[in-house]
Image: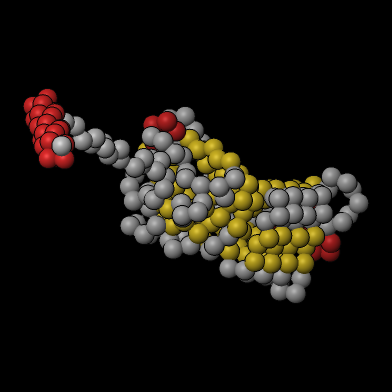
């Protein structure tokens, strides 16, 4: 595990100092274990950084990531409180949110690091910027029935010729991924199944899946194909055929003649 202090002013707090000391003495031991912030304890990252070398980060107390950078997180388990402010959190394993996560303007980035073939995203979390990318076809499974919301930017990408799998934790049951209508999105090289973009959120990857080098693997709501345009119903304008028009003219002419004759007869009687 590598500890990085960009300012050198030691504002990581006692918890991080203890982690650093153990890391220097027993780096392989720490890499294979987990880093825990116990209930009632806090870890303030400031604008420094830490590399956990794929150790699990368990938050029972409070993590204040502020403007820092936490790299190499294996699994991130939130039972207490975590706040990102403008921090960058890089996760190579699972994200399990059973507590409170304040996104601020921070970035959560899921990567291929930690050599996982698959990872789960559990609990409902509000992200500011969510980035998930994989060059090895990693599978991400979002908790069925839960919704991950993204306020600013959503980045989902596999690699050319190798699609990343995005789906629900239970086949046939949808998981929600809601991007704010004003948010930006970048989608490419995906295989998507059992995912839903809830009403009121942005349509994800509107258009044909091929436009995104992606595959619609089924049971997706408001993904790929855009809202179908309402059918254009031709309006029939009543028309009069040539024969009908001739009959109408004859009837009008005959009526005019009768009216003229009645007028002549009345004039004769008066005289």
Give the quarter of the figure containing the C terminus: top left
- Which residue is more in the foreground, 161 or 206? 206
Left/right of residue 131 with respect to residue 36 in the rendered view: left
Q: Of all residues shown, which one is farthest toward the bottom? A: 40
Image height of 44 relative to 213, above or below: below
The colour scheme is: secondary structure
Pinpoint residue 37: horizontal percent, then vertical percent: 71, 67
Look at the picture and state if 261 lies above or below 14. above
Give whichever of 221, 226 is nearer the camera: 226
Q: Position of residue 213 (x, y in %)?
A: 42, 32
The reply, left or right, for residue 99 in relation to residue 207 is: right
Query: Residue 87 at x, y = what percent?
Result: 73, 50
Q: Nearer the viewer, residue 119 or 27?
A: 119
Measured as percent of width and height from the top left, residue 137 is found at 45, 40
Res. 90 in view:
no
To which quarter of the image does residue 132 belong? Answer: top right
The residue sitting at 53% across, 64% down in the picture is 123
Which residue sits at x=81%, y=49%? 48
Left or right position of 219 against 52: left
- Occupied quadrant, residue 104: bottom right
The residue under the point 74% across, 50% down is: 86
| Residue drawn at 54 percent across, 37 percent down | 186
> In terms of depth relative to the viewer, which is nearer, 268 or 246?
268
Residue reaching furthest to the right: 9
């Amino acid at each position: 595990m590598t500890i990085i202090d960009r300012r050198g002013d030691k504002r990581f707090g006692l918890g991080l100092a203890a982690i650093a000391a153990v890391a220097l003495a027993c780096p392989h031991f720490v890499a294979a274990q987990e880093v825990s912030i116990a209930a009632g304890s806090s870890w303030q990252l400031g604008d420094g950084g830490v590399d956990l070398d794929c150790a699990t980060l368990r938050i029972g107390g409070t993590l204040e990531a502020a403007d820092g950078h936490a790299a190499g997180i294996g699994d991130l388990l939130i039972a207490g409180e975590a706040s990102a402010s403008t921090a960058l959190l890089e996760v190579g394993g699972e994200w399990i949110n059973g507590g409170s996560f304040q996104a601020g303007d921070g970035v959560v980035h899921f990567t291929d690091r930690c050599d996982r073939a698959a990872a789960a995203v559990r609990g409902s979390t509000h992200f500011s910027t969510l980035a998930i990318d994989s060059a090895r076809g990693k599978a991400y499974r979002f908790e069925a029935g839960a919704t991950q919301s993204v306020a600013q930017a959503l980045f989902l990408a596999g690699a050319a010729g190798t699609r990343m799998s995005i789906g629900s934790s239970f086949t046939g049951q949808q998981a929600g991924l809601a991007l704010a209508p004003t948010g930006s999105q970048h989608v490419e090289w995906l295989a998507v199944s059992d995912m839903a973009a809830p009403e009121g959120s942005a349509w994800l990857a509107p258009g044909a899946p091929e436009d995104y080098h992606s595959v619609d693997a089924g049971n997706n709501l408001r993904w790929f194909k855009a809202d179908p345009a309402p059918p254009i119903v031709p309006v029939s304008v009543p028309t009069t055929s040539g024969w009908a028009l001739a009959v109408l003219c004859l009837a009008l002419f005959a009526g005019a003649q009768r009216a003229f004759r009645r007028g002549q007869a009345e004039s004769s009687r008066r005289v």
